[in-house]
Image (spheres, helix red, strand yellow):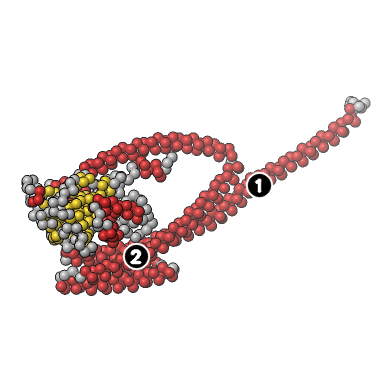
Amino acid sequence: MNSGQDPVAAPASRPSRVAESLQSQQMSQLKSDAERAFTRILHRATYRPIAGLLLFVVLLTAMIGYLVNEMTWVNYTNRIIAAGLDVERKLLDVQSGIRGYFLTFDDDLLQPAIASRPAVPVAIGELQKLVAHNPSQLEKAQHLETEINRWLAATDSALASAKASHQAPSQENQKTRSAMFDDIRDEVSNFQAIEYSLRDQRTAGAIRTGLLTVGLALGLAAFLGVVQAVAIRRGLQDVTGKFRDALELNERRAEQIKQLVRELDIELKAVAEIQRSLLPMKLPSIPTLQLAASYQTSRRAGGDYYDFFRLPKGESVAPEQEKWGILIADVSGHGTPAAVLMAVTHAIAHGIERPLDAPSKLLEFVNDRLCAGYTVENSVFVTAFFGIYDPASRTLEYSSAGHNPPRLLRGETGTFTPLDEAQALPLGIMAREEYLDASIRLQEGDTLVLYTDGWTEARPPGSTELFGEERLDEIFLTRRDLDPTAVMEQALADLDRYTGHQPPLDDRTLLVLHAAPMGHDDGERTVSMLANPPTLLESVEAINPA
């Protein structure tokens, strides 16, 4: 064969070529199928996340818009609340300025009232503009404006009359205006309570929207996490490591904070013990008087202060000729700062050397020294009531520096008389203030109750109704046949029930002086020191037991 090919091999080459052709077609088909499958996978991996992302963006934008709207309303409600507080603050400026002027006829004390008086209508007008969208609140604001105008008219009339006669308005006039002012404050409080409730509702809606937005973000993160598993896994490993380090650091810092709190507790306990050491732990034996007292702080240390002074100081006289100084005081504020100022007040009161011929002299002495170096720059003050009791005549001379007037229960008639005839500014506000003196004679069977405002301003949780003077009077009136210690214990039990057995929000001090028969002597009695509030560490662990 001239071709030189194998005659047997030649026929076999055709099936081989056919097989190769078929294999090539199959490979091409497989490749095409693989390309289409890869394209589908690529499309799913590309377009689905994009579609999901676009959907998420739309939903997220809508949710953010809703959230912004909710936050806008929250901010708007805050503006209404601030406007209401502004109205209340200006009213308080007018009320405090007028009251201070009626007490002292000092034009300087009237300046805040003069400055705030024309701003009150503007403030209530602004409040009405803000609630114009809310018919019920607008109606309340309009009614509030009417009541405020009535009160301002009555106040302007009383001020004009006082300036003309240079005499304070009658007690009836002052009580009427005070009742009007209290009603206005109640209406403001009710108005504000509605706005606070609206703000809470809108805040809750914003929180729900925020949580939903976070949920959508987490869903997108999970979807993208499937697409980018390796990167996320590495990221999670890094985050886990950092989180583990952060937890370890947090545990170390938590233990350090607990240690600091323990040390601070020790210091606060020391402050409380030092403060209590400045107070009489036992009541003195005063002829013709039975005494009882209780003392309770709202925190580890407090700013209430009471004391007894044997007079004349440094001289030896027969017991029946001795006079006694009786002091109760209340430092503004709470806790350690108030306790420090209480200790300063104690030191100043015990530092007076001149004979105390009148109670006002002690208050003037303490006031001048507090103003000189302790209170004016710090904007703090001390209310105080000081009396000098003469057992021989049962006479109590007294002077008050803005303190709650003691309540005198007449045993014979069962009527109460407030000792409010010698009121002046609290200590530490104005140097060289002149304090007044007054006197009253106790009769056998009378009871004098001295207290700080932690008693009358106590209230149940979630309520604005104060314990008040009437409830305090009722306790002593219905139990006036009991021993002072027994009636004081009943008063403590009644107050504890009224407040729902909650820790006090303010320091509470109560002194009970009962006029006993001549020659009666109870001897020394221990002061009721009630249990301290929880320590800082106990409070922290109660919030976060872990």
Q: Quadrant of residue 224?
A: top right
Disc on res. 28: none
Residue found 21% across the figure and 44% down from its top: 281
Q: Is residue 333 visible?
A: no
Give the total number of marks visible in the rendering: 2
Q: Could you say where residue 89 lies in the image, as x and y percent from the top left?
A: 30, 62
Whether residues under marks 1 and 2 lie with C-beta atoms below 8 angstroms apart, the answer is no
Q: Could you say where residue 209 lies in the image, as x and y percent from the top left?
A: 51, 55
Query: Closest to the observer: 99 or 534?
Result: 534
Q: Quadrant of residue 398?
A: bottom left
Q: Could you say where residue 15 lies in the image, as x and y percent from the top left?
A: 87, 33
The C terminus sits in image quarter: top left
Disc on res. 43: 1
Query: Closest to the observer: 464 or 485?
Result: 485
Q: Nearer the viewer, mark 1 or mark 2?
A: 2
Q: Amino acid at mark 2?
A: Asp
Element type at marker 1?
helix
- 3D distance between C-alphas at marks 1 and 2: 67 Å
Residue found 24% across the figure and 55% down from its top: 451
Q: Could you say where residue 391 lies in the image, as x and y percent from the top left?
A: 12, 54
Neighbours of disc 1 within 10 Å: few (<14), some (14-19), many (20+): few
- The earlier-in-sequence mark between 1 and 2 is 1
Query: Closest to the observer: 433 or 69?
Result: 433
Element type at marker 2?
helix
Instruction: Give the vertical position of 176 relative to 246 (above or below).
Output: below
Instruction: Give the vertical position of 410 relative to 350 (above or below).
Output: below
Neighbours of disc 2 within 10 Å: few (<14), some (14-19), many (20+): few
Q: Amino acid at mark 1?
A: His
Residue carrying label 2:
186
